[in-house]
Amino acid sequence: GQSLEQPSEVTAVEGAIVQINCTYQTSGFYGLSWYQQHDGGAPTFLSYNGLDGLEETGRFSSFLSRSDSYGYLLLQELQMKDSASYFCAVLSNAGKSTFGDGTTLTVKP
Amino acid sequence: DTAVSQTPKYLVTQMGNDKSIKCEQNLGHDTMYWYKQDSKKFLKIMFSYNNKELIINETVPNRFSPKSPDKAHLNLHINSLELGDSAVYFCASGQRGGNTIYFGEGSWLTVV
């Protein structure tokens, strides 16, 4: 089976940096993805890590440590529009994506 | 152009009814999914099809029956709806072996 843990809520102020952690227990691990979902919207893909290390995409970066079964999403220069839910998702080598329970990020002025 | 489209977007129905949600993707992907998101925003996979073949079937009641007439379509039929079926149902697609899932806009199902 697969299980993922991420914080349920995170609050930060505009312009700050926030890190959302994700730990997982899984068999057949292939990679870790991150998705963003605004209220009333669909989840949208942000980032993927198949190998250890940091992947950077603009203000967002994602990190993976396979040996620690751990990853994080780093959001820099926070903007109000970044207020959303963020999901980590484990991709198995069978092609199945299992999502964490999501982290609600609230960005305050 | 809508990549993954699903209809209807909103559905309110009574317990015991049967309803269907349709989904189509124009991305040329091999794999399609149905996910259920409950009121706590937990996103759980229900089914996955690859080229019309069922490859993932989570522990979903057999009242839920997916049908894939071709690799661009994956419909979801639900029999004998229950209150607990109220949720948002997301259709999604991706390339087989790919790391990105593309979600539709969701279908809000309310069972009363």
Image (cartoon, coloured by chain):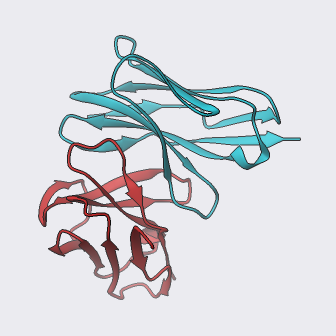
Q: Position of residue A16 (x, y in %)?
A: 79, 28
- Is B29 on the left or on the right of B102, as rendered? left
Q: Position of residue A69 (x, y in %)?
A: 38, 18
Q: Residue A31 falls in which quadrant of the image?
A: top left
Q: Is residue A40 above or below residue A104?
A: below
Q: Residue A73 falls in which quadrant of the image?
A: top right
On the rendered image, what quadrant is the C terminus of chain A found in?
top right
Q: Is residue A46 above or below residue A23?
A: below
In this view, the residue in front, A77 or A33, is A77
Residue that appears at 28% across and 81% down: B79
Residue that appears at 31% across and 82% down: B80
Q: Position of residue B83 (x, y in %)?
A: 46, 74
Q: Residue furthest left?
A: B53
Q: Is residue B95 above or below residue B88?
A: above
Residue that appears at 18% across and 40% down: A94
Q: Residue furthest top?
A: A67
Q: Residue B104 falls in which quadrant of the image?
A: bottom left
Q: Which chain wears red?
A: B
Q: Which chain wears cyan?
A: A
Q: Position of residue A51 (x, y in %)?
A: 34, 20
- Is B75 on the left or on the right of A47, as rendered? left
On the rendered image, what quadrant is the N terminus of chain A found in?
top left
In this view, the residue in front, A18 or B111, is A18
Residue that appears at 57% across and 42% down: A86
Q: Is residue B25 above or below residue B17?
A: above
How many numbered circles are shown? Answer: 0
